[in-house]
Image: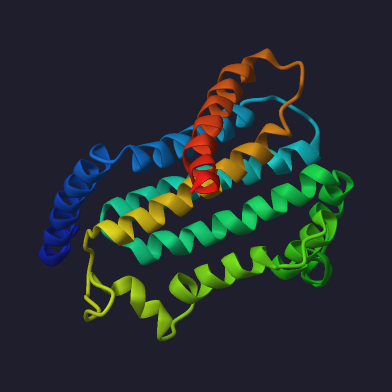
Amino acid sequence: MTRDIPENLTRLHSAEQLLRQKACSMIAADPRLQLHLSVTEAAMDLADSLRTFSTNDEDLKVAQILGMRTFNAFGASIKLTLSGYHQNSALILRDVMETVFLLDLFASDRPLIERWRFADKKARMKDFSPVKVREALDARDGFTSKKRFEMYELFSELAGHPNMKSAWMMRRQKDGDAVIGPFIEATALEAVVSEMGRLAVQVGEKLDQFFPANWDQGLPSRLAFAQLKQTWIMTFYARAASS
């Protein structure tokens, strides 16, 4: 006999739906949050567009699959943060960060894709673990500040690993008590959505590099992302530079 979903879980879902309405109202009143979500949607559309390109190139298929992974991750992260699960949403964004770092490495060194495809676990951990990928990107770009590590570490401490700092994302107020269950609070919502937008810009940039140059079908998605990316940069980086 099939049992109904437990009543408490049904009530929890109803509460999540109410919180989503509250979050959507907050986003509707804030053009910055709208822009972060718009560029995220554009990056997701880019991943979906690249997915439809028919190819026998196994290396390109890797880029397509990684793009699909970011699509699913963004979708899940949006659903979670709009339902009040900000910490869990941020945990999924850490997965996006790892994936876009890998895409970045592959975009600049295509032969690495084949090595990654055929690597066993030992070789994968030796050459393509998250720390090795970050180190390779920093060496390529001549970065010594380890900003990639700092961002990864931040996501890990706040969302990825149980520790005292991870309790920060379970509080409605900075100095308040941790709460159980979902909640909507402006600072937490803005923090997650803004990081989502920042990662979406990176994802879109890297996926765009894998589009075949002569594939006209992909142009609408590429142009839409490029326009939103430019607006996003001018909104957040130009303002920061002038302040």
Q: Quadrant of residue 16?
A: bottom left
Camera-nearest residue between 81 and 54: 81
* Figure coloring: rainbow
Q: Is residue 46 above or below residue 5?
A: above
Q: How many marks?
A: 0
Q: Quadrant of residue 90?
A: bottom left
At a point 84% along the width and 55% down the height, the residue shown is 140
Camera-nearest residue between 5 and 191: 191
Q: Residue furthest top?
A: 216
At a point 23% along the width and 39% down the height, the residue shown is 29
At a point 22% along the width and 76% down the height, the residue shown is 179
Place of residue 3 in the rendered image (x, y in percent of width and height, measured from the top left): 17, 60
Place of residue 182 in the rendered image (x, y in percent of width and height, measured from the top left): 23, 64
Camera-nearest residue between 157 and 122: 157
Q: Is residue 149 above or below residue 75?
A: below
Q: Residue furthest bottom?
A: 164
Q: Is residue 243 above or below residue 174?
A: above
Q: Is residue 42 above or below residue 165?
A: above
Place of residue 132 in the rendered image (x, y in percent of width and height, measured from the top left): 77, 67
Quadrant location, the N terminus: bottom left
At a point 40% along the width and 56% down the height, the residue shown is 192
Place of residue 33 in the rendered image (x, y in percent of width and height, measured from the top left): 35, 43
Q: Is residue 80 left or right of residue 46?
A: left
Q: Residue furthest front?
A: 243
